[in-house]
Amino acid sequence: MKVTEKDVAYVADLANLELSEDERSRMVRDLNSILGHVDSLNALDTKDVPPMAQVSDRYGMDESKKGSERFAYASRDDVKEGLRKSFPTEVALANAPEADGAFFKVPKVIER
Amino acid sequence: MATSVERSAPARTKYEPVIGLEVHVQLLTASKIFCSCSTRFGDPPNTNVCPVCLGLPGALPVLNRKAIEFATLAAMALNCEIRETSIFARKNYFYPDLPKGYQISQYDKPLAEHGFIEIETNAGRARTPGAPQTKRIGITRVHLEEDAGKSLHEGFVGAGETTAIDLNRSGVPLIEIVSEPDIASPEEAYEYLTRLKEIILYTGVSDVNMEEGSLRCDANVSVRPRGEKKFGTKTEVKNVNSFRFIREALEYEIERQIEVIEGGGKITQETRLYNSVEGKTYGMRSKEQAHDYRYFPEPDLLPLVVDEKWRTQIRSTLPELPEARRKRMMSDYGITAQDAHTLTLTKLLADQFESAAKAAKNPKRVANLVQSELTGRLKAKGLEIEQSPITMKGVAESADLVESDVISGKMLKDLYDLAFERGKDFPAVYEEEGRPEQSRDTSALEKIIDEVLAANPKQVEQYRGGKKTVSGFFVGQVMKLSKGQANPQLVNELVAKKLD
């Protein structure tokens, strides 16, 4: 058992999740099973394999392009026009549980 | 804190503070970092928002190239090494002004590292009296990230029960500049921030306006017994909105920590808010694990590659930075460090001065006039140099008139007084006064000299007795009687001729 009840409670707290007793023990079981499966990768020697953060930087790229140009297609110029427009305020606020026509409203945040 | 005075005087020397600063600077792009909403400050709340910066499900970020260029330029100005391939990471935390539940930032592979800023410090004064020393404050990293929205806690109906959220600022590009814990006093922290602000301002990537929040600073501070290598437990001071308050907050916090330790207590690692009215810091109620952000690579963005070619291109836009410019101007124009400082307060002012000085007959005279005639008058009126009625071009024009002997130094002084009185530039006042010229009328001057000599027989006798320096007295008298209109050199010659 690598993942303990305590670990699950800690991560749930960070993620703002409230777990019932049942859910917590299920999470312990599931997480251990997943991590156990991932552990099987340790059988491989990955000493010379660089860490990969994104799949898309290795596959499906235009291999003729190097350096900054390689990823340039995924960036944009600093323009406000010609791209997606901002929402009108009423649209932006439409899904908010509480709003006053100008601001989103949330339960009082206490800074100290 | 009644006991602090008696205790801290000797206690203060037993401990040394260790300070590190985290500065957030908003980049002056027109649009946000991951979407095309406007970054304009002061727009009505929630008008510059879209699915990306509202964190709506399915929305994907697209990187603004200008933000990368600005961040890279700033990092270069701060002497950093630029990492060719950096990656974005998600910093996960919950706060109402962070709609996605994470901030896109950089973590283990930031854009830039290993920079420094040089500051002047008084630390060397004890050894070399009067000589400020240069101290290098390391910069750990400069990374790119998005800003969060803005929470309003008061000033609206229902503020007792609710907090209002404006997401216009959500997604505005920021750089975070993290210093090494090299800062040894609140004074050095102040100096570091002043230099940092000046450098950023010169690069033009931000307006570094603290009131509008385009520069924000958090300070990490701890104390340790002098000579100890290990750091003490640090606290983080937040919510400080001016450099002066940061200095004050640090002073307070250092005293407080020393007092706790001297009293046998322990410092708790925590975030503290500074109350500038009371001049005190207060601990925030925060959870122990608040600093566990569970960073992981941002899967929605490709690696950020700033290759050699792009770096060269960006570096070519780097202007001469304030410190280098001051040194060059001191040698080019023979001005003091103080005046070089005044003239380089903003890049615009320095540019104006240099273009005016270069166009003038004698660039050094332009610098001297700024030093001797302009700054004093500005100070007396409580004006900043940017608000001067006499522009740099005006100073250059007046310098040329003196240089070619058209007006005397005294006349220049009078014209400057008039310019300040009327709030007009030098050329306008010179025109209004009918383009005055100093007197070269030899016969008129000779008449005045005769009067002066006749009125001061004792001095005449001294002169003839061999005390040649008395001639200065006569020249002064003649200049006075001519109301400063005479050419001093001419008067000098005529006086000598009369007496010999």
Image (cartoon, rainbow, N blue to C red):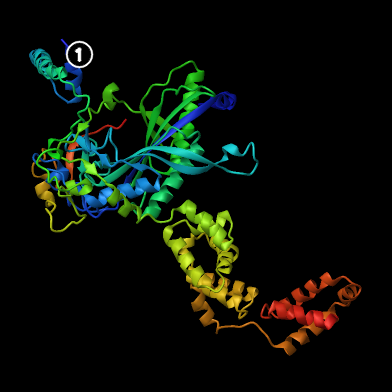
Residue A1, how many percent across, how many down?
15, 10
Residue at 35 percent across and 52 percent down: it is B315
Residue A90 in the figure: left or right of residue B232: left
Residue A84, how many percent across, how many down?
11, 53
Chain under label 1?
Answer: A
Residue at 26 percent across and 39 percent down: it is B86
Residue B347 lies, with reference to residue B145, above or below; the image says below
Residue ID for mark 1: A6
Q: Which part of the image, by quadrant, shows the C terminus of chain B?
A: bottom right
- The reply to whether residue A49 is in sight is yes
SS assignment at label 1: helix
| Residue nearer the viewer, B326 or B304 | B304
Residue at 43 percent across and 18 percent down: it is B266
| Quarter of the figure with residue A105 | top left
Residue B91, how many percent across, how many down?
23, 33
Residue B108 lies, with reference to residue B117, above or below; the image says above
| Residue nearer the viewer, A58 or A20 | A58
Residue at 50 percent across and 35 percent down: it is B185
| Residue nearer the viewer, B412 or A57 | A57
Give the crowd class for mark 1: few <14, some 14-19, many >=20 residues within 10 Å: few
**What type is the residue that disc 1 sits on?**
Lys
- The reply to whether residue B2 is in sight is no
